[in-house]
Amino acid sequence: MSEGQYTTMTPNRTDESMVDESSDTYDTIEWLINNIPNNNGKVGQWGISYPGFYTTAALPDAHPALAASSPQAPIADFFFDDFHHHGAYTMGYWYVTNLFGLQHDGPTDTSWYDFPDVFTNDMYLLYSELTPLSKSSEYYGEENFFWKELSEHPNYDEFWQSRNILPHLKDIDHPVMTVGGWFDAEDLYGPLNTYRSIEEKNPGTKNILVMGPWSHGQWSSPSPHQSVGEIYFGEGISEFYRKEIEYPFFMKYLKGADHEELPEAYMYDTGKGAWSTFTEWPPKNAETSTWFFNGDGALADKPSTSSDTFTEYMSDPENPVPYTENDELVFIPRAYMTSDQRFAARRSDVITFETEVLKEDVTLAGDILANLYVSTTGTASDFFVKLIDIYPPSVEEGEHTPGGVELDNYHQLVRSEAIRGRFRNSYEKPEPFEPNKVTYIDLPLQDVYHTFKKGHKIQVQIQSTWFPLFDLNPQSYVPNIFKASESDFIKATQRIYHTSEYPSSLEVKVLR
């Protein structure tokens, strides 16, 4: 029902002659408090997903009446959230591009867009036929401005930088509660970095982070049972959040209700299945530890002493690693965030490093950094790092486990992240790999709060394709992968090094 021209993530304005989400919200609040009877002069705002971005974007230069804000699953930067992960294009979202890319003629209460009329509901087959991405012109023409923006801005240029809201989150003078889901396939970067940015730029502002065992926006669901994919987390979790966290937050700051101050961080341990509260995030008692990849396939607290200096695999774009065993075409992939990864662990183009069976619980609380020393026979490659919780063979299925799912030896995905290797040194200025040269890549994975229980094992998987969740890298360098041709796609041998000189590892924060 909006007027005007839509643009994805309207940039924060640089002068007062421009209009942005903040100025629009300011005018809305001014009208509300002067025209709606019986108000107390205090306004709150919240929104989930894209409305979460609206909420965040209204924080800079906010109206004085704005007294409480809650960005929930907010987009923060489209080069790291939703449509990209460290520059890798999230191809699983291709199907919904019309939703973001078609203008309407004026206010309307009916859909002005359609989704593409594709020839199959087999997601793997569909996206295989859409590789290279230039084939998408059959479905998305000049009228789809967002597809044009995606394909013409493959690098982190001014177009994307101007849509990053994080640098503008300063001089915030009212309480903010950012909410996210640990298994949100769409917006996980957003809430974590929105909280982090507000914390850094506004040290005196009441700033709260809430993260639960949810997929995208599940905390608003009335369902009493909380599952993501095939993993069940418990009952009443979302109701607890709404009654004991969200409601008190707004009642306290909008109506002065006598509720206790909420803690800085209200976090759900997705391995133990319980809420915890912290005075800061990451917690003070979370110590940085380094888990090294060893030549014998071990994930250990010491560098490798094996005579094997590297582990290698062949990455073939014509036989990419699937992101799931379910090929059904979905609106947006979500369930994979907790999915069983044992099928991938058994492929020759996925390498694994894992611990022995744990003798005690290990709880990670905070950010993760993958330090990779790699080489490739090509000139371009992607790298995907996955953190896995391997269940013991003795685990039995529960009442809410879907039919046909075996939890014994289940390889649950806990966290994953992607990086388009050309951006290893700069997101603005990509560069090719020098074939067979050892090259360092640091890949930040998003935060976790997860207990790997006694009797489980911890595994790391590394691969160079994760299809069709992410598009395929040709593995030969081209200026723009959206414009690549079929002849650009080649096989490449990838090596992950694990020596004292090149100690590939995972830096984690272990709760003591």
Image (cartoon, rainbow, N blue to C red):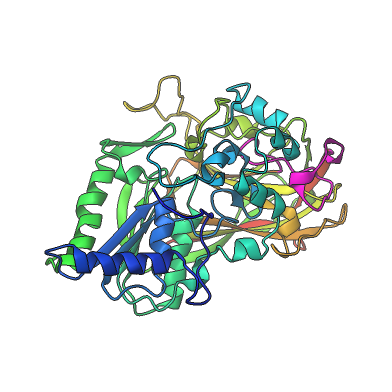
Q: Is 467 covered by the magenta stretch?
A: yes
Q: Residue at x 48, y 66 (%)?
A: 287
Residue 271, compared with residue 209, is above or below; it is above
Predominant secondary structure, magenta span? loop
Q: Is residue 283 visible?
A: no
Say whether residue 84 is left or right of residue 40.
Answer: right
Q: Nearer the viewer, residue 396 or 71?
A: 71
* Residue furthest front as drawn: 105
Tell me what residue is drawn at x 35 percent, y 54 percent: 47
Residue 28 can be seen, yes or no: yes
In percent of width and height, residue 236 lies at: 24, 41
Q: Quadrant of residue 279?
A: bottom left
Expressed as whole percent of the image width and height from the top left, the position of residue 14 reads 53, 75
Instruction: Determine whether, in the image, residue 214 is placed left or right of residue 298.
Output: left
Of residues 21 and 72, the one drawn nearer to the viewer in this rendering: 21
Percent across and percent down for residue 263 are 28, 65
Residues rendered magenta in the picture: 464-490
Q: Residue at x 30, y 44 (%)?
A: 220
Counting labels gives: 0
Q: Is residue 270 magenta?
A: no
Q: Position of residue 355 (x, y in %)?
A: 57, 46
Residue 504 placement, left or right of 172: right
Q: Is residue 216 left or right of residue 325?
A: left
Residue 204 higher or lower than 479, as above or below: below
The quarter of the picture where residue 322 lies is top right
- At 72% from the left and 60% from the top, the residue drawn is 424
Q: Pick whichever, 506 or 448, lies toward us.
A: 448
| Quadrant position of the C terminus in the picture | bottom left
